[in-house]
Amino acid sequence: MKNMASIKEVLENIEHLDINDQTYIFGVLSKRLIELKRSEIAKRAIEAEQTFRDGNVKSGTLDDLWNDLND
């Protein structure tokens, strides 16, 4: 719960800033989140490529995959 208190304090401090500073902070955080999401997508892509190279990928039609799941 300490973390939530810290977040609340940060948000309250940001509220006291003028609109330009708040806009700047929003931009910085937005860019950081975009980069974090890109990194996660890249990591998942690398894992998917490795899974494919290892031969641990199933392919087929939706019906084929559905039947395979239900076997």
Image (cartoon, rainbow, N blue to C red):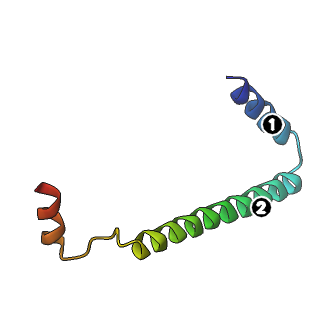
Residue 11 versus residue 33: which sits nearer the camera?
A: 33
Above or below, 9 relative to 30: above
Q: In which quarter of the image is the N terminus?
A: top right
The residue type indicated by label 1 comes to Val
Residue 23 versus residue 61: which sits nearer the camera?
A: 61
Residue 46 versus residue 37: which sits nearer the camera?
A: 46
From the viewer's perspective, tell me whether residue 11 is left or right of residue 60. right
Marker disc for residue 27: 2
Above or below, 2 relative to 23: above
Above or below, 32 relative to 46: above
**Measured from the top left, where is residue 14 in percent x and y?**
83, 42
* Callout 2 secondary element: helix
* Callout 1 secondary element: helix
Q: How many marks?
A: 2
- Which residue matches tag 1? 10
From the viewer's perspective, tell me whether residue 21 is left or right of residue 26. right
N-term mark: 1 or 2: 1
Residue in the image at 40% along x and 74% along y: 52
From the viewer's perspective, tell me whether residue 62 is left or right of residue 32. left
Q: Which corner quadrant of the image does residue 12 belong to?
A: top right
Residue in the image at 51% along x and 71% along y: 45
**Measured from the top left, where is residue 70 in percent x and y?**
12, 55
